[in-house]
Amino acid sequence: MSTRVFVACEDPQLDQHIAVPVVQALFRQGLGKRQARVQAITNPRIRGVEDLLANLPSLVRRYAPLGSCVVFAADLDCALVSSA
């Protein structure tokens, strides 16, 4: 039985090309799930970390029943840290 994993990125258009292979390697090599199918979430279209955080509950409700896991990925190119 394969493991189906959904990855929600804060900017899926760009970040999915990095996040999906990393999560795929984690499941296949690190967790031994050789049949893991990893897919980026592109609907709804998330734009930024605030949008990702605001949509967390609806993304879990929508995608958790379809797969084994939902992974949330945010990189540090967003404005999470205010400059002092």
Image: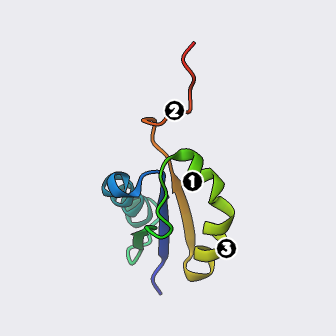
Counting from the top left corner in percent of width and height, residue 74 is at: 49, 46
Counting from the top left corner in percent of width and height, residue 7 is at: 47, 63
x 65%, y 68%: residue: 58
Label 3 residue SS: helix
If the image is split into quadrants, where does the C terminus sit? top right
Q: Where does label 1 land, which residue?
A: 52
Say which label, 2 or 1, has the lower sequence index: 1
x 41%, y 70%: residue: 38
x 46%, y 67%: residue: 41
- Image mark for residue 61: 3
Mark 1 is on which residue type? Answer: Leu
Q: With 71 as the anchor, is 24 left or right in this view?
A: left
What is the CA distance from the residue labelled 3 to the residue labelled 2?
A: 27 Å
Mark 1 closeness class: few <14, some 14–19, many ≥20 residues within 10 Å: many
Residue 35: which quarter of the image? Answer: bottom left
x 69%, y 63%: residue: 57
Label 1 residue SS: helix
What is the CA distance from the residue labelled 1 to the residue labelled 3?
A: 14 Å
The reply to whether callout 1 and callout 3 are in contact (CB within 8 Å) is no
Say which label, 3 or 2, has the lower sequence index: 3
Label 2 residue SS: loop
What is the CA distance from the residue labelled 2 to the residue labelled 1?
A: 13 Å
Q: Where does label 2 land, which residue?
A: 79
Considering every residue shown, the one lying at the far top of the view is 84
- Is residue 49 placed above or below 42 in the rendered structure? above
Q: With 34 as the anchor, is 84 left or right in this view?
A: right
- Image mark for residue 33: none
